Amino acid sequence: MRFFNLGFTLFEMILVLVVAALVAVVAIPNIQPAIASMELQSATRDVASALRHTRGQALSRGRMEEFVLNVNQNFYKVPGRHKPYKLPSMVKLKLFTADFLMSEGQGSILFYPDGSASGGRVTLEGAGKSRLVDVNWLTGAIVIRDEIND
């Protein structure tokens, strides 16, 4: 009667671990930029959505509503919700508005009951890219676009 060893040898296990480590060394640096880019896109969509929500609140409530953005602490606030929404630390923010700067690093974009806004631009930077969220002062429309470097 013959018995076969159905297990793996130590050499085979080490060989599999070495191959897995080599694959990880090659794959991880290629995945990091993709993850960073997805975080930037997600943060941009979140900010645009919050701006649209604020505009919708101004229209439905018939009063001025304020979107607050803190560029130093990487968060924003929307009306009717007390908690601030934190953005990923790798995403850097810039805010350009008419002049509704409340304190150091914190500013706001106002939306009026007729749908118009104080206007402004939120710039999100990360993964070597910049994404812009523009708020039209006349219509209050919110548009996302990539920054084009001339």
Image (cartoon, grey):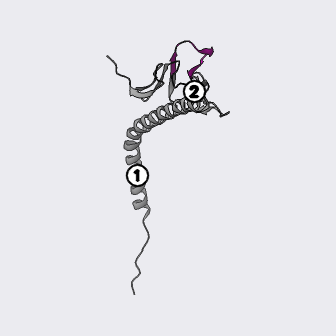
Query: Is residue 60 within the magenta segment?
Result: no
In the image, the segment drawn in magenta is 94-112
The residue that disc 1 covers is 20
Q: Nearer the viewer, residue 61 or 31?
A: 61
Considering only vertical position in the picture, is 97 above or below 37? above
In the structure shown, which secondary structural element does the residue marked by tag 1 occupy? helix
Give the label on residue 74, or none.
Answer: 2
Residue appearing at x 38%, y 44% in the figure: 27
In the structure shown, which secondary structural element does the residue marked by tag 2 occupy? loop
Give the label on residue 147, or none.
Answer: none
**Residue 146 rendering spot, x and y as whole percentages:** 38, 27
The reply to whether callout 2 and callout 1 are in contact (CB within 8 Å) is: no
Q: Residue furthest top?
A: 99
**Residue 79 rendering spot, x and y as whole percentages:** 63, 30
Considering only vertical position in the picture, is 62 above or below 11? above
- Of the image marks 2 and 1, the number of the one nearer the N terminus: 1
Amino acid type assigned to the residue bearing label 1 in the image: Ala
Amino acid type assigned to the residue bearing label 2 in the image: Asn
Residue appearing at x 39%, y 27% in the figure: 145
**Residue 144 rendering spot, x and y as whole percentages:** 42, 29
Residue 1 falls left or right of residue 62: left
- What type of secondary structure mainly makes up the magenta span? strand
Q: Mark 2, mark 1: which one is toward the viewer?
A: 2
Real-space Cα separation, disc 2 to disc 1, in angstroms: 37 Å
Total count of labels: 2
Q: Nearer the viewer, residue 23 or 106?
A: 106
Query: Is residue 96 within the magenta segment?
Result: yes
**Residue 114 rendering spot, x and y as whole percentages:** 53, 24
